[in-house]
Image (cartoon, rainbow, N blue to C red):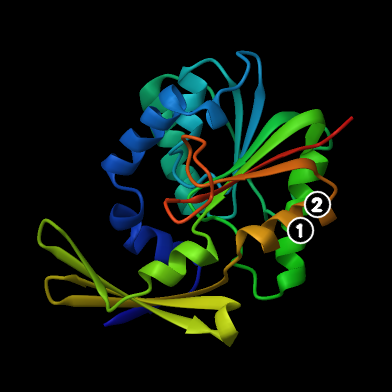
């Protein structure tokens, strides 16, 4: 039996990669870029994918002609992203950096933070700092799109353990609410033959109201919240919490 650390541990991303970033997820990104008005950007847009992982969005964005930079703290994930970009024959700038500290003031027209890649720092002030990084990286008039599982949605879905099977591999995920719904803990068990790997992630969860306030405190104006990439309202039928915010001139 082995145990990996949290989201800053490359062993975690390597061990659980196939469950976190399936080919279905890559295909979903392609579909979203083709259909979502929230992800429709000018052809010459400079796009920062903050916490880009293995290139789920960076590669299809580059294939559509965008000037794309992918930033991640995981060297293992960036290696996969570089390989995927090379196989696709597209150019993506990859930078290994902490999402709180990456600097390129006014360097982008769009900043993306997708698939619940927000809230993982132990100190809530660091999550706010990450939002300020997103703000500072945008040129005046630029757009942030931040997508996560909102607290309201999680309240419907925190259920008995979730079991996922891929081929002969089996993963069991158990979620626990912490601190009166301030945080969530996910305990993961991955079984590959006789090998068992355990990992635990703890992150802050946000309601739409909380996330909107954080974005406004970071400096953003025109903050909107949607219940999915199709632009639906954030109500009882919401599938995701998608925040779109503008850095005003």
Residue 104 placement (x, y as % from top left): 79, 38
- Residue drawn at the location 53% of the way across and 44% of the way down: 233
Q: Quadrant of the N terminus?
A: bottom left
Up the image or down, 95 lies above or below 189; here it is: above
Q: Which residue is mark 1?
A: 213
Q: How many angstroms separate mark 2 from mark 1 (CA)?
A: 5 Å
Say above or below: 168 vs 158: above
The reply to whether residue 163 is visible in this rendering is yes
**Going 66% across and 51% down the picture, which residue do you hit?**
97
Asked where in the image residue 159 lies, by quadrant, the reply is bottom left
Q: Which residue is disc 2 drawn over?
A: 216
SS of the residue under disc 1? helix
Residue situated furthest bottom in the rendering = 179
Horizontally, is 138 left or right of 171 in the view? right
Packing grade of label 1 (10 A; few <14, some 14-19, many >=20) is: some
Q: Estimate the x, y position of residue 180 in percent, counting from the top left.
A: 58, 85
Label annotation for residue 84: none
Measured from the top left, where is residue 40 in percent x and y? 55, 23
Q: Secondary structure at mark 2?
A: helix
Which residue reaches farthest right? 249
| Residue 98 left/right relative to 116 | right
Would you say the residues marked 2 and 1 are in contact, meaning their CB atoms lie under 8 Å apart? yes
Image vertical order of residue 202 relative to residue 179, above or below: above
């Amino acid at each position: 039996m082995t145990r990996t650390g949290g989201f800053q541990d490359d062993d975690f991303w390597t061990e659980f990669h196939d469950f976190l970033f399936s080919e279905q997820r890559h295909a979903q990104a392609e579909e979203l870029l083709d259909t979502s008005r929230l992800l429709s950007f000018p052809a010459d847009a400079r796009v920062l994918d903050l916490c880009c992982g293995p290139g789920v969005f960076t590669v299809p964005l580059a294939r559509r002609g965008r000037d794309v930079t992918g930033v991640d703290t995981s060297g293992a994930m960036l290696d996969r992203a570089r390989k995927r970009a090379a196989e696709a024959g597209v150019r993506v700038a990859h930078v290994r950096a902490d999402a709180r500290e990456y600097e390129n003031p006014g360097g982008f027209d769009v900043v993306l933070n997708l698939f619940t890649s927000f809230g993982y720092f132990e100190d809530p002030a660091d999550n706010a700092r990450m939002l300020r990084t997103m703000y500072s990286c945008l040129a005046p008039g630029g757009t942030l799109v931040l997508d996560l599982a909102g607290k309201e949605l999680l309240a419907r879905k925190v259920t008995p353990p979730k079991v996922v099977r891929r081929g002969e591999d089996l993963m069991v995920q158990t979620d626990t609410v912490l601190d009166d719904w301030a945080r969530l803990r996910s305990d993961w068990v991955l079984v590959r033959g006789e090998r068992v790997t355990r990992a635990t992630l703890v992150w802050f969860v946000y309601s739409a109201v909380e996330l909107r306030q954080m974005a406004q405190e970071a400096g953003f104006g025109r903050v909107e919240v949607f219940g999915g990439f199709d632009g639906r309202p954030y109500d009882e039928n919401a599938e995701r919490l998608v925040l779109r915010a503008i850095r005003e001139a």
